[in-house]
Image: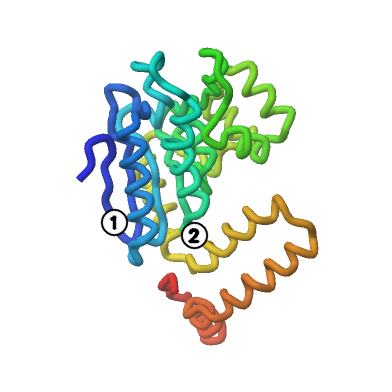
Amino acid sequence: MFETITYETRRNVAWITLNRPDKLNAFTSQMHKELLSALKTANKEEEVRAVVITGAGRAFCSGQDLGNAESLDYGDVLRNGYNPVIQAIVSMEKPVIAAVNGVAAGAGASLAFACDFRLVSEKASFIEAFIHVGLVPDSGNLYFLPRLVGHAKAMELAVLGEKIPAEEANRLGLVTRLVKEESWVEEVETFAEKLSSMPTKAIGLIKRYLNKSWDADLNEVLEYEALAQTAAGNTADHKEGVAAFMEKRKPVFIGK
């Protein structure tokens, strides 16, 4: 079905793997299209309750493939390629996990920052590589990075473009969970499957209104919360949660 990525569903989790390991999973226009298609599929499939994006081989994603850089209009590449992918991740009302198995550079770092959670291998690193080729951080980087680490640190990382090892990324707040290499697969699977077993309709509402809160005042956020709580209160998972609480048992959520 795909040539530059792989897609499979296991235990209610969609696993999307960037699959150009010989090129450190660098983006091409084909990869943009295939990743967007996979994200749309995961969003539509009712059985999918969480999504993992990771990379094949030793890299997560090294950013844009610069093999034909001289013929590229970067603005068009962003509008037609990267931006729809970032928007698909943010608008998807399911948790999206970046499983950063190796280097995440340039737009690869941006891709990870756009996800809801970042599980990061101890051998991984982030690089704001744009400055090294005279470019500006893109693919949502200038939006997400300051929200994750603060304005001053984002300016430092973007301008200096220094390698950020996993331990330093964890200290800065870029990492949800730092994972030892020897337990990488097990921990990513456990984390993803835990999310997929939670009340994912509520998670989707949390994601939607957290995103809206950045451009809202307190009164708007209070109303967003009221709207979200009405929607969440009508879900089967809320009813199951209350029943489980009353019956002193563990709830079994179905994502509805």
Can residue 122 be seen in this snapshot? no
Residue tagged 1: 10
Three-letter amino acid code at disc 2?
A: Glu
At x 36% / y 26%, what residue is drawn?
A: 26
Specify few, some or many for label 2: CA neighbours under 10 Å numbering under 14, 14-19, or 20 or more: many
Report the side of 224 relative to 34 (left or right): right
The quadrant in which residue 152 appears is top right
At x 64% / y 33%, what residue is drawn?
A: 172
Q: Secondary structure at mark 2?
A: loop
Dot placed on the residue nearer the N-terminal end, 1 or 2: 1
Quarter of the image where the C terminus is located: bottom left
Count every numbered label the image shows and give the total: 2
Query: Where is residue 90 shown, x and y percent of the image?
Result: 52, 50
Label disc, if present, on residue 104 of the rendered structure = none
Of badges 1 and 2, nearer the viewer stands: 2
Three-letter amino acid code at disc 1?
A: Arg
Report the side of 205 relative to 188 (left or right): right
Q: Secondary structure at mark 1?
A: strand
Label disc, if present, on residue 93 of the rendered structure = 2
At x 42% / y 36%, what residue is drawn?
A: 81
Quarter of the image where the N terminus is located: top left
Given residues 45 and 68, the one toward you in this image is 68
Report the side of 207 relative to 195 (left or right): right
Query: Where is residue 174 shown, x and y percent of the image?
Result: 58, 37
